[in-house]
């Protein structure tokens, strides 16, 4: 084991990694450099990154223009904050730019550094909003099973994946979950989109009524669920959910951390999924991962209450040292220039159609393919055991998804195993070529063929 691997093994506490395994085996891969969709490790082996890191490197690796923007801004003004009405130029320009792309009705941007902190900010905003409206009981937040909203205390609680709760005393008492609209595991036999959607909306309505509408503040949802399985809702799902929310005066928060800035072929996932959110969280694609930056976009309905209410509470008592960090804002501006100039949002839609069709075709003849699904440049293939007319999950201990991912990695393609079933996901940079998609699909298909 090289010195660097030894340092990593001995000193780094890795996220989402099994500590004992890491102590014994060390790093699976030590990335050293990257260009386009390709990563090179410390031994010189190249990997096609079909996940864009963690669903984030939308414009691809190695962009000089973003590197220059980071360096130039660090030289000119390496840091200043936004507390007490202080401001920096890049943050102001970026806020306008983000609002100009957002759906109608959004007027303000609150910056942070990660998707998790954005969702924590969301919870505080909705509580503050209802306190200002003299509704101090209206505080519960409903999320969905399999939703992924981050790892800070509130956002991990909102996340609907048991692996993020185990050992952490989560979720919190003010959080509730409803079912994910999962075609494979939640849809009843013979249920069409309309009936499935109506049942999901009824479940939400029943929960709000049972809890008491005057205790429920918000519902949070990803337009297309990412880490929970790339779950694309049925047609009409969000309008139906939204009718329930409107009836009970419950805010809709769109968690656009993956979908925002183009991954579904539209600027925001809400545009594609017909959501009309009151609040949105974005991160990842805002800088394509070149710098840690997130934002909460606040709609006029909520902002007007906060603004008027500042007479009651004075300063809004929330913000991070790195809120509106000028270097990260400069990276975001250069990233958005690239997205626009290279027409990458449209490209993500087109390449996404190609990727989804290729996956469907390549995996159709594999007996353990239960479903191939996706939208834009997000896709998953889910594996299960055929069981009469339906499917049965593999025993998690068999590790079918993780074994496929490891075999593909051996052959130089990075995809990701998702929890709660045996789905593997694909979410490449928007610059991915047809040949790179073909290579990713054929490599993973071959890997899947070896695992039974
Ligand atoms: N929300 C969604 C939809 C995500 O996919 C993620 C991360 O994958 C987060 C929130 C959390 O973002 P972060 O890891 O930057 O805290």
Image: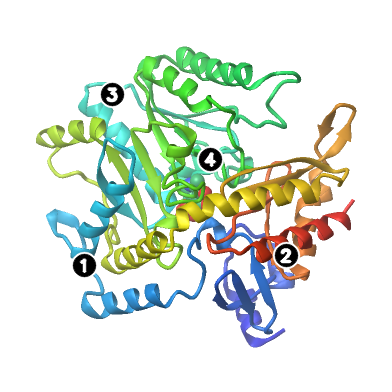
Which of the two discs, 1 and 2, sits closer to the camera?
A: 2
Does label 3 or label 4 sit earlier along the sequence? 3
Mark on residue 131?
A: none
Does label 3 or label 2 sit earlier along the sequence? 3
How many numbered marks have been drawn onto this rendered protein structure?
4
Residue 305, by quadrant, is: top left
Residue at left offset 48%, top offset 52%:
346
Task: Quickly name the residue at label 1.
Answer: 80
Q: In this view, does 25 lie above or below 139?
A: below
Residue at left offset 36%, top offset 61%:
336
Residue at disc 2, secondary structure: helix
Mark on residue 439?
A: 2
Does label 3 or label 1 sit earlier along the sequence? 1
Task: Quickly name the residue at label 4.
Answer: 159
Q: Distance between the residues labelled 1 and 2?
A: 45 Å
Residue at disc 1, secondary structure: loop
Q: How far apart are marks 3 and 4 (CA)?
A: 24 Å
């Amino acid at each position: 084991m090289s010195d660097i691997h030894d340092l990593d093994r001995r000193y780094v506490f890795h996220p989402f990694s099994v500590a004992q395994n890491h102590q014994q085996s060390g790093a699976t891969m030590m990335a050293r450099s990257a260009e386009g969709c390709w990563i090179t490790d410390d031994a010189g082996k190249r990997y096609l990154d079909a996940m864009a890191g963690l669903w984030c490197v939308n414009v691809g690796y190695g962009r000089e223009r973003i590197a220059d923007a980071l360096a130039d801004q660090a030289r000119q003004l390496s840091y200043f904050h936004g507390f007490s009405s202080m401001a920096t130029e890049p943050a102001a320009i970026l806020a306008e730019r983000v609002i100009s792309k957002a759906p109608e009705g959004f007027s303000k941007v609150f910056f942070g550094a990660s998707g998790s902190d954005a969702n924590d900010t969301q919870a505080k905003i909705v509580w503050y909003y209802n306190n200002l409206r003299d509704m101090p009981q209206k505080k519960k937040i409903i999320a969905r099973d399999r939703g992924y909203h981050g790892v800070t205390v509130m956002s991990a609680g909102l996340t609907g994946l048991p692996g993020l709760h185990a050992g952490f005393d989560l979720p919190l008492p003010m959080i509730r979950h409803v079912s994910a609209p999962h075609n494979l595991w939640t849809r009843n036999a013979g249920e069409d989109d309309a009936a499935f959607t109506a049942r999901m909306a009824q479940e939400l309505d029943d929960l709000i009524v049972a809890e008491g509408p005057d205790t429920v503040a918000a519902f949070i949802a990803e337009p297309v669920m990412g880490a929970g399985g790339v779950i694309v809702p049925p047609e009409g799902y969000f309008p139906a959910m939204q009718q329930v929310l409107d009836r009970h005066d419950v805010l809709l928060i769109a968690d656009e951390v993956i979908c925002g800035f183009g991954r579904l072929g539209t600027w925001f996932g809400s545009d594609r999924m017909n959501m009309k959110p009151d609040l949105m969280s974005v991160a990842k694609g805002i800088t394509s991962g070149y710098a840690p930056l997130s934002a909460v976009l606040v709609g006029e309905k909520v902002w007007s209450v906060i603004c008027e209410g500042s007479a009651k509470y004075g300063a809004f008592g929330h913000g991070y040292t790195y809120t509106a960090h000028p270097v990260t804002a400069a990276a975001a501006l250069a990233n958005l220039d690239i997205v626009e100039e290279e027409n990458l949002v449209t490209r993500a839609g087109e390449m996404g159609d190609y990727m989804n069709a290729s996956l469907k075709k390549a995996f159709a003849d594999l007996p353990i393919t239960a479903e191939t699904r996706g939208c834009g440049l997000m896709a998953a293939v889910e594996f299960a055991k055929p069981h009469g007319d339906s499917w049965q999950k593999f025993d998690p201990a068999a590790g079918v998804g993780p074994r496929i991912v490891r075999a593909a990695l051996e052959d130089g393609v990075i995809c990701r195993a998702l929890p709660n079933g045996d789905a593997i996901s694909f979410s490449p940079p928007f610059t991915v070529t047809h040949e790179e998609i073909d290579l990713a699909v054929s490599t993973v298909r071959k890997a899947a063929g070896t695992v039974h």
